[in-house]
Image (cartoon, helix red, strand yellow):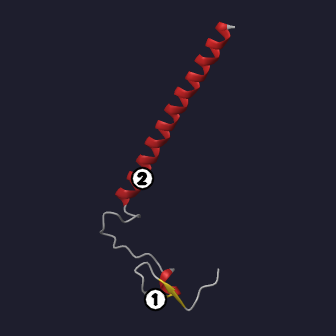
Amino acid sequence: MVWDQAAFCVCGASCPATTIMGKLNIAHHKSYHPYRRDNIERVRRDEEEARLKEAQAEGKMLLAVSLLQSAKRSWS
């Protein structure tokens, strides 16, 4: 992809292309900073909860499939 001399920024102003692809600067004291220890721990905790929920849903689906297969065998 080739950038023009000036590209349009999110704000709608004409900005140099280097400012569009610049470094993300977030103050470390902000609660939404991605590298704060509490945010890292929260993401890990949320990912673990999601894995457990997915595993539980997968187990329920396997149980339902096995019950359907056994019901089909008993009707045959």
**At 46% from the left edge and 88% from the top edge, which residue is drawn?**
15
At numbered mark 1, what does the secondary structure look like: helix, strand or loop? strand
| Above or below, comparing residue 44 to residue 58 in the picture | below
**Residue 46 vs residue 16: left or right?**
left
Residue corresponding to mark 2: 43
Q: Residue 27, which numbered label?
A: none
- Which mark is nearer the camera, 2 or 1? 1
**View extreme (right): residue:** 76
Residue 5 pos. (x, y %):
56, 92
**At 37% from the left edge and 63% from the top edge, which residue is drawn?**
36
Dot 2, how many residues are within 10 Å of its Cα: few (below 14), some (14-19), or many (20+)? few
Cα separation between marks 2 and 1: 36 Å
Q: Quadrant of residue 76?
A: top right
Residue 6 pos. (x, y %):
52, 90
Q: Quadrant of residue 35?
A: bottom left
The answer to which of marks 2 and 1 sits earlier in the sequence is 1
The amino acid on which the numbered mark 1 sits, given as a three-letter code, is Ser
The amino acid on which the numbered mark 2 sits, given as a three-letter code, is Val
| Above or below, comparing residue 67 to residue 38 in the picture | above
**At 50% from the left edge and 32% from the top edge, which residue is drawn?**
57
**Residue 46 vs residue 3: left or right?**
left
| Above or below, comparing residue 18 to residue 35 in the picture | below
At numbered mark 2, what does the secondary structure look like: helix, strand or loop? helix
Residue 73 pos. (x, y %):
67, 11
Query: As rendered, which of 24 and 72 lies closer to the eye?
Result: 72
Residue corresponding to mark 1: 14
Image quarter where the N terminus lies is bottom right
Give the total of numbered labels.
2
**View extreme (bottom): residue:** 5
Dot 1, how many residues are within 10 Å of its Cα: few (below 14), some (14-19), or many (20+)? few
- Evaluate if marks 2 and 1 touch, with contact meaning CB atoms under 8 Å apart: no
Residue 21 pos. (x, y %):
51, 80
